[in-house]
Image (cartoon, rainbow, N blue to C red):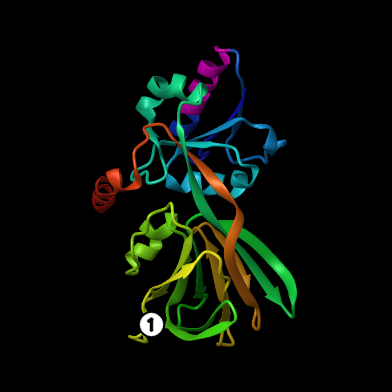
Amino acid sequence: MRILLVSNHYKEATQTVALETVKLLQGQGLDVEVDDEWETMQDQRQFDLLIVFGGDGTILRAARKYAITGVPVLGVNMGTVGFLSSIEVHELEHYLPDLLNRRFRLDQRMMLQVTVQKAGQTSQQGCCLNEMVIKSTDHQLNNIMVEIGPDQVGKYRGDGLIVATPTGSTAYSLSCGGPIVDPELELMMITPIASQIISRKPMVVSGDKTVKLSSVDDRGVLIRLDGQVELPLEPDAVVSVQRADYKLNLINLKSTSFFHHIDTRLRRSETL
C-alpha cells in the first residue's frame, strides 16, 4: 500500500505530526511519501490513500490537487472548525487499523469546474471544492450578468457573486445568507454578496446545468477559487461554472452523518 501524507508547511505542528506518522506507517512496512506543499508530487494516480494534516484550508488545497485521481482522502483536523475532517489528530493512532484495512465509508463530494473564455477561446481553467467567487478588484459595486443553461437570468448588482457546492454551503455562501445544503446532493447555489437589488436572493440550481457569468462593467474583476486561488477576468470574458466530471472521495471513519455534527462545528466556528 502506498500512502501520501499532506501537511501545511506554514505550521510546524502539522509537519511534526506528519513525520511521526511516516515513522509509524513505515514501521508497518508501508510505502509513505510526504507532500508539504513546497514541491509538486509525481505519479499522483499511484497512491492508495491520502492523509491530510491541517485545517479545512489544507484539505481544500489537497482536493484541488488530488481529487481528480480518485484517491480516498482522510482529513485529520489540526485546525479549528474541521468541517472536512473525519477525525481529530489525537484519534489517528486509534483509527489507523480501520483506515489501513479500509473499514470506512466514502463520502463523495461534488466539485466545480471553472473555465474562463474570451472570444470563444479558453484562457484559464481551475477547479474548486467549496466555491467560486467573482468580485471587482477595486471594491466597487459589480454588475454581473448571469445565465443558467440557455436562459439569461438577469443582472446582479452588489459586491460580488458566489457559486457554491453543497460542501461549500457552510462556508462563504452561508455567511452571505445562503442555505445549508446536504453534501450528498449535486447542485449549485448562486449567492449574491451584499446585493443592492433586494429581489436578488440566493438561488439553487441543478448540478446538470452550466452557470455563465460575465461582468457588465469595464473594469478589473477577479475570480477566487476556494478563497485560495485568484484568476483575473479580462473585459468581455465569460466564466462558465459546472459540475466537474470527478468527485472528492472523503474518508468517513466514524460513519457519522453530515447533520450529526453540523451544529457542533458551526458553534465551534462562532468562538474563533
* Label 1 element class: loop
Residue at 51% from the left image edge and 22% from the top image edge: 100
Which of the 4 quarters of the picture holds residue 30?
A: top right
Asked if residue 26 is among those painted magenta in the image, a careful observer would answer: yes
- Residue 89 placed where, x, y %? 38, 30
Magenta-highlighted residues: 17-28
Q: Magenta segment, principal secondary structure?
A: helix
Q: Position of residue 255 (x, y in %)?
A: 37, 35
Where does label 1 land, which residue?
Answer: 200
Say which of 102 and 78 sits in front: 102
Q: Residue at x 26, y 47 (%)?
A: 268
Q: Position of residue 159 (x, y in %)?
A: 42, 78
Q: Is residue 90 visible?
A: yes
Residue 126 within the segment the image draws in magenta: no
> Residue placed at 52% from the left, 24% from the top?
19
Quadrant occupied by the N terminus: top right
Residue visible at 43% across and 32% down in the picture: 13
- The number of callouts visible is 1
Vertical side of 82 occupied by 243: above or below: below
Res 92 quadrant in image: top left
Q: Amino acid at mark 1?
A: Arg
